[in-house]
């Protein structure tokens, strides 16, 4: 396997074997981290982290992972650079390529990260766009594999706005890796037909399936994994809240949903999540619409079936794998026997 120099923009660009390789590498890096074995094989290299939208997990994961690999980081926040305002993406790509060995980008349209990658000489990693969140998928798949010991053949149900980054990305990841994907939402929130078609093609190789349904009872039956995401994503206007609450409330992940899924089902959420009144937006929505929670109840979020914090930690290990593989430090990590590290 050689992923050196590759961009990481969407899992559509990666084969099943390449994705599994990244998960295996992440598992190895996680084990080393737990044992305190250093993996700082990329000393002297630097990465740029562009965030045009806010972040906790993705930013921290890139920073910690880069530092663990021995690299320096430069964080460009949503307001503090010239990007987009005084300097084009094309020029930014060529400037940053001269200073950094890799570039992470979180922002709006997928076409922006694609353009950044086109004009960069170094790997570009997608840290979330409106359409895709591929590093999140690696973390989710690692978490699912850690829990069930496998991926192929499992049933994953995504409830809520299935036409945005998380819904799209789950459909791509499942169809690449042979999971049975169900999007459960009102029809207008289904992923677009073009992407569904592309993913159906991936399923022919992987053995996965795709189901789109409005029926919660049918969707969740025998599910292994139930996932959801916020009803209004970063960058969307406040005006859409009322419509989303109305449309998506029947698709909230409740204890009844988990019970109907069956005793083996686990819950995933990329986070951040509105499961209580502990946030400013949560409180505002409570005052305006009377809701105590939104896409998931606090009961499910805090239950034993919820793997959300394991999932959040896995962001760091999987992002480390992406950087290590695309910057060429993976072979040494994979070939080292555990306990013989330099740390
Ligand atoms: N899941 C995720 O991407 O979280 P952040 O927005 O905090 O990075
Ligand atoms: N759909 C969410 C995911 C956050 C990690 C958003 O784009 O805001």
Image (cartoon, rainbow, N blue to C red):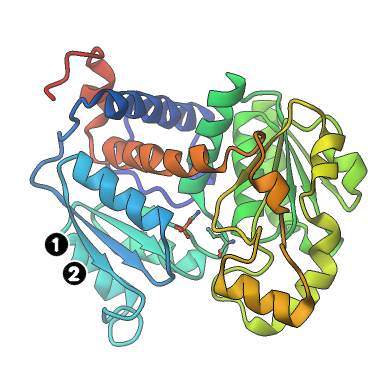
Quadrant in the picture for the C terminus: top left
Position of 269 with respect to 51 (left or right) is right
Pointer 1 residue:
98
Q: Residue at x 74, y 82 (%)?
A: 288
> Going by the image, does 175 lie left or right of 124?
right
| Tag of residue 210 | none
Residue labelled 2 has its Cβ within 8 Å of some atom of ligand 1: no
Residue 128 image point, x, y percent? 47, 59
Nearest the viewer among 123 and 226 is: 226
Does residue 221 appear to the left or right of 311 in the view shown? right
From the viewer's perspective, is residue 181 above or below residue 190? above
The N terminus lies in quadrant: top left
Image point (26%, 72%), residue name = 92
Residue 302's x, y, as percent? 64, 44
For residue 329, above or below residue 240: above
User: Could you tell me residue 240's position as x and y percent?
Assistant: 71, 79
Residue positioned most to the bottom: 86
Q: Is residue 123 among the parts visible in the rendering?
A: no
Q: Which residue is mark 2?
A: 95
Which of these two is toward me, 193 or 325?
325
Q: Are marks 2 and 1 in contact (CB under 8 Å)?
A: yes
Q: Is residue 225 visible?
A: yes
The answer to which image quadrant residue 268 occupies is top right
When asked about the image quadrant of residue 88, the answer is bottom left
Does dot 1 land on a helix, a strand or a loop?
loop
Ligand 2 found in image quarter: bottom right
């Amino acid at each position: 396997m050689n992923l050196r120099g590759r961009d990481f923009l969407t899992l559509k660009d990666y084969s099943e074997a390449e994705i599994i390789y990244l998960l295996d590498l992440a598992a190895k890096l996680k084990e080393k981290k737990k044992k305190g074995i250093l993996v700082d094989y990329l000393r002297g290299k630097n990465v740029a982290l562009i965030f045009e939208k806010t972040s906790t997990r993705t930013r921290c994961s890139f920073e910690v992972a880069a530092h663990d690999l021995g690299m320096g980081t430069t964080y460009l926040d949503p307001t503090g650079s010239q990007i987009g305002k005084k300097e084009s993406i094309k020029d930014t790509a060529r400037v940053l390529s001269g200073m950094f060995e890799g570039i992470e980008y979180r922002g709006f349209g997928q076409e922006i990260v694609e353009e950044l990658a086109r004009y960069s000489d170094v790997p570009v990693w997608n840290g979330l766009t409106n359409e895709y969140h591929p590093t999140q998928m690696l973390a989710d798949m690692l978490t699912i594999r850690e829990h069930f010991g496998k991926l192929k053949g499992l049933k994953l149900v995504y409830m809520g706005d299935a036409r945005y980054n998380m819904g799209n990305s789950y459909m791509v990841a499942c169809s690449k890796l042979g999971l049975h994907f169900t999007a459960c939402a009102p029809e207008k929130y289904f992923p677009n037909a073009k992407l569904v078609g592309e993913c159906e093609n991936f399923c022919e190789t992987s053995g996965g399936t795709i189901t789109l349904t409005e029926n919660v009872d049918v969707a969740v039956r025998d599910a292994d994994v139930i996932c959801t995401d916020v009803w209004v994503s970063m960058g969307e206007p406040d005006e859409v809240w009322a419509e989303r609450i109305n449309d998506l409330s029947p698709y909230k992940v409740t204890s009844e949903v988990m019970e109907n899924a069956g005793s083996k089902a686990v819950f995933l959420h990329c986070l951040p999540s509105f499961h209580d009144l502990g946030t400013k937006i949560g409180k505002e929505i409570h005052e305006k619409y009377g809701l105590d929670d939104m896409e998931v109840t606090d009961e499910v979020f805090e239950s034993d079936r919820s793997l959300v914090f394991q999932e959040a930690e896995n962001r760091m290990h999987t992002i480390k794998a992406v950087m290590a593989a695309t910057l060429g430090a993976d072979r040494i990590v994979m070939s080292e026997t555990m306990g013989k590290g330099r740390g």
